[in-house]
Image (cartoon, rainbow, N blue to C red):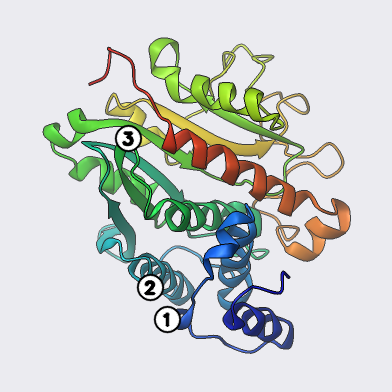
């Protein structure tokens, strides 16, 4: 780690190696850390995956993750709330953690990532990586005047059928939907062979198109679905993650993901040529990913964080804006 990290980060890493428990409420980051793209995301990812562990929907660990994420948003000085919900005839409880950052415009962009995981593995890739980038972006942009206001959401119970994102979208008023420029989803960013950004068809793909333009300008290794499978046209993806409920409301989406659309059934499910899917398996750990793909996690987090920071800072909706 860099010498100018705050003492807490040193303690966090030491405690992780020693298996100790660190209080989430004491996390503090030195501003210089924000200049190392992906570094904060990596620390948040590790905390969720190892200090907390697997975070199945409705479990005690999912609630620990909720507390951690809420504490991070509050530490950043963002207006934060927890949106509780239940499903399966009210037998399972979960929550969305929502933070708001005002921008130059009252129109808003939603940026979301689910914080629950399946029971096997540690949920490093799926989806502590997405939450890590979400929290890093919130940190980096907290004092920057962004073109649009930002609603950050950590969704609960995605693995149980998009429960959190469905609940949030269903609670939106017509006015809120009309006021939302787009939704950016972050899911499984760490392990896949290639980094992608997707979006809707036609004008609804403006988030993807602007992201690809930024990637080209900054020479970031990010592309889009090549459209080899006719069921998923070039630049788009399936409705299997937290962007889907917003897409169904007519809100344009962008979606960042690491996988491989050129192998298997050409549907993006097989993330790696050597090992297929990492998500939802016992291989979703730092130990496995780092041993098989040294440096990939750090590179992906850095790339996605750099891309998303510029995308939000310079987002420009055309005259067709809602």
**Which image quadrant: the N terminus?**
bottom right
Question: Do the numbered discs 2 and 1 sit on residues whose CB atoms are within 8 Å?
Answer: yes
Mark 3 and 2 residues: CB-CB less than 8 Å, in contact? Answer: no
Q: To which residue does mark 2 refer? A: 71
First of labels 3, 2 by sequence position: 2
Identify whether 170 is placed above or below 175.
below
In this rendering, the label closer to the viewer, 3 or 2:
3
- Secondary structure state at the residue bearing disc 2: helix
Q: Position of 3 compared to 109: left or right?
A: right
Q: Are marks 1 and 3 in contact (CB under 8 Å)?
A: no
Q: Residue at x 64, y 14 (%)?
A: 227
Rendering quarter of residue 172: top left
**Can residue 118 be seen?**
no
**Residue 310 on image: x %, y %:** 51, 37
Relative to 319, say whether 84 is above or below: below
Which element carries disc 1, helix, strand or loop? Answer: helix
Of residues 190 and 91, the one nearer the viewer is 190
Location of residue 193 by image quarter: top right
Q: Taking 247 as reference, is 55 left or right?
A: right
Q: Position of residue 280 (x, y in %)?
A: 64, 53
Residue 147 tag number: 3
Residue under the image location 69 percent in, 32 percent down: 220
């Amino acid at each position: 780690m860099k010498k100018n990290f705050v003492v807490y980060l040193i303690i966090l890493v030491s405690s992780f190696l020693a298996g100790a428990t660190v209080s989430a409420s004491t996390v503090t980051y030195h501003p210089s850390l924000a200049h190392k793209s992906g570094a904060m995301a990596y620390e948040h990812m590790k905390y969720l995956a190892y200090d907390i562990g697997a975070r199945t929907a409705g479990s005690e660990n999912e609630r620990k993750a909720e507390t951690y994420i809420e504490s991070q948003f509050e530490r950043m000085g963002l207006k934060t709330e927890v949106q509780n919900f239940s499903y399966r005839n009210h037998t399972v409880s979960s929550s969305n953690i929502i933070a708001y950052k005002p921008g130059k415009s009252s129109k808003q962009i939603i940026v979301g990532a689910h914080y629950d995981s399946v029971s096997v593995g540690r949920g490093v890739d799926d989806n502590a990586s997405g939450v890590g980038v979400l929290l890093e972006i919130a940190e980096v942009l907290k004092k920057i005047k962004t073109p649009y206001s930002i609603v950050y959401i950590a969704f609960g119970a995605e693995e149980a059928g998009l429960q959190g994102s469905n609940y949030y979208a269903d609670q939106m008023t017509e006015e809120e939907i009309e006021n939302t420029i787009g939704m950016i989803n972050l899911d499984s960013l760490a392990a896949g062979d290639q980094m992608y950004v997707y979006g809707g068809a036609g004008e609804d793909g403006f988030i993807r198109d602007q992201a690809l333009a930024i990637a080209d300008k900054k020479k970031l290794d990010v592309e889009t679905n090549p459209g080899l499978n006719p069921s998923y046209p070039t630049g788009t993806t399936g409705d299997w993650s937290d962007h889907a409920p917003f897409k169904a409301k007519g809100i344009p989406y962008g979606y960042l993901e690491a996988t491989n659309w050129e192998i298997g059934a050409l549907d993006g499910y097989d993330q790696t040529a050597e090992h297929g899917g990492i998500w939802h398996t016992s291989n979703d750990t730092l130990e496995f990913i780092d041993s098989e793909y040294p440096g990939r996690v750090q590179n992906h987090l850095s790339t996605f964080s750099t891309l998303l920071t510029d995308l939000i800072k310079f987002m420009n909706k055309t005259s067709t804006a809602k």
